[in-house]
Image: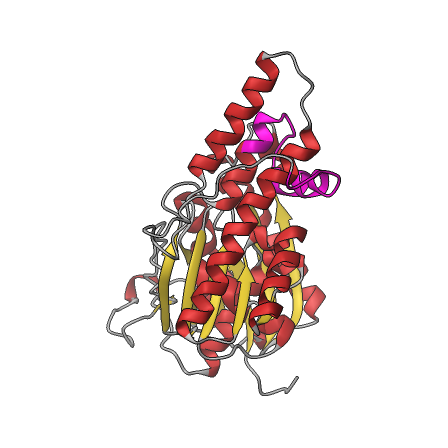
Amino acid sequence: MAADEPLVLGIETSCDETGVGIVRGTTLLADAVASSVDTHARFGGVVPEIASRAHLEAMVPTIERALKEAGVSARDLDGIAVTSGPGLAGALLVGVSAAKAYAYALGKPLYGVNHLASHICVDQLEHGPLPEPTMALLVSGGHSSLLLAPDITADVRPLGATIDDAAGEAFDKIARVLNLGFPGGPVIDRLAKEGDPKAIAFPRGLTGPRDAPYDFSFSGLKTSVARWIEAKRAAGEELPVRDVAASFQEAVVDVLTRKAVRACKDEGVDHLMIGGGVAANSRLRALAQERCERAGIRLRVPRPKLCTDNGAMVAALGAEMVARNRLPSDLELSADSSLPVTEPHVPGTAHAHSHDHVHEISKDNLYS
C-alpha cells in the first residue's frame, strides 16, 4: 500500500444495508455496515420507506465508525464515492445527499457510481487489479447479470440478465413457501448441505437451443417448486425440506455457472469474477470452481462479506475513478433507481454548473 494511492470513502445505500467503506488504492482500510434486515424480516421482504429511514439514522454514526476503524481523518480523503443507482429511490437519495454534503463540506471530489460496477470492482480488494476485460457474473436479490467489462470505470457491457425474478429473489420466495423466514439465501444454503440435490428434477429455465444464451429466468423454477410443495402438503405427505432446498439450489446454480462459463469461452476470456449477495452461496462457489477448472478458467470470488452490499465496493470503484483521473460528479448529482450498468459512474460537466446558491453556507458549519 503506497501513501500516494487515492484514499476514498464509499457510501452504499441501495437497499437495506448502510455501508461505508474506506480504501487506499486497492487496500481495504475499513468496512462498516449497519443493517436493517431484522426490521424487514417480519414483512418477508424489504420495505422501502423503512429502509430509507434506517439509512438516515445510521448514516453519520456509520461514517464516523469507518473513519475511526481506518485511522484516518475525513480531511485526509481524496474523494467521496456513493452509489447513485440502481436501487430503491428513497434509500439511494439518503446516501447521495450525505455524500454531497460531506464532499462539499470537505472540498473533496464527488463520484456517483453504479451499484453493479461496484460489485465487480470490489474483487480488487481481494485479488488485486482486475484483468481487462473482466467477465463478471453478478447474482443478488435484485440482479442476475452477465457483464463484460473492458474498463470498469468507463466500459461495462451487458451480455445477459434475468428476464423475470433474480436468483436471490427466487431464494427468498422459496424460503417463504417453506416457512424458513427472510432472507432466504443463507437458510436454504445451510439446509441444502443436508439434502440430496438430485432428489427432485426441477426445471432449468432458458437452457434450450433456441433460448437466449446468456439470459436467466427463475420464475418458472419458482412456480414449479411452489406447486411441488403444495401437492405434497395437499396429499398430507411429509415435506422433505432439505431435499427441496438442495434440488432447488442446484437448479439455480447449475444455470448460473453453465451460462457464465459459456460466456467466457465465447468471448475468449480466461477468467470469471462472481459477485453479489448470492455469490456467498457455498454451492455456487463450489460448482463454479469445478466447472471453471475443467474449462481452464480462473475463478475470482471475493470473501462472502464483500459479496453482499457494502461501502467497500463503492470506495473501491471510487478509488479507481480517482486513479484513472475520471471526471468527478457535480453537486447536482441525484439518485437514479434505474441507472443502467453501461454507466459505471455519473460524470460531471467540469464546472459547467454554478453552485452559487450554496456558497453562502459555511463549510466549517457543515463539517467540523
Quadrant (top left, top right, bottom left, bottom right) of the N terminus: bottom right
User: Measuring 67% from the left and 62% from the top, which residue is drawn there?
Assistant: 303
Depth check: 67 or 45 in front?
45
| Residue 114 visible to an observer of this rendering | no
Res. 348 image quadrant: bottom left
Q: What is the count of numbered marks?
A: 0
List x then y, in percent, for residue 29.
Answer: 67, 71
Position of the C terminus, as image quadrant, is bottom right
Magenta region: 174-198
Viewer-side residue, 211 vs 182: 211
Q: Answer above or below: position of 194 versus 269.
A: above
Answer yes or no: is residue 181 visible. Answer: yes
Question: Most extreme residue toward the front, as rendered?
Answer: 209
Give percent across and percent down for residue 289: 63, 64
Q: Position of residue 132 (x, y in %)?
A: 46, 79
Q: Quadrant of residue 310?
A: bottom right
**Between 180 and 220, the one nearer to me in the picture:** 220
Q: Please tell me whether residue 152 belongs to the stretch shown in magenta.
A: no
Left or right: where 59 falls relative to 93: right
Along the line of sight, which residue is nearer the eye, 96 or 336? 336
Residue at the far right: name it: 194
Answer with left or right where residue 199 lies relative to residue 333. right
Give the image location of residue 38, x and y in percent. Answer: 64, 36
**Quadrant of the rendered image containing residue 186:** top right
Location of residue 49 with respect to 292 vertically, above or below: above
150 vs 82: above or below: below
Among all residues in the image, which is located at the extreme left? 352
Tell me which colouring the rendered structure shows: secondary structure
Q: Is residue 188 magenta?
A: yes
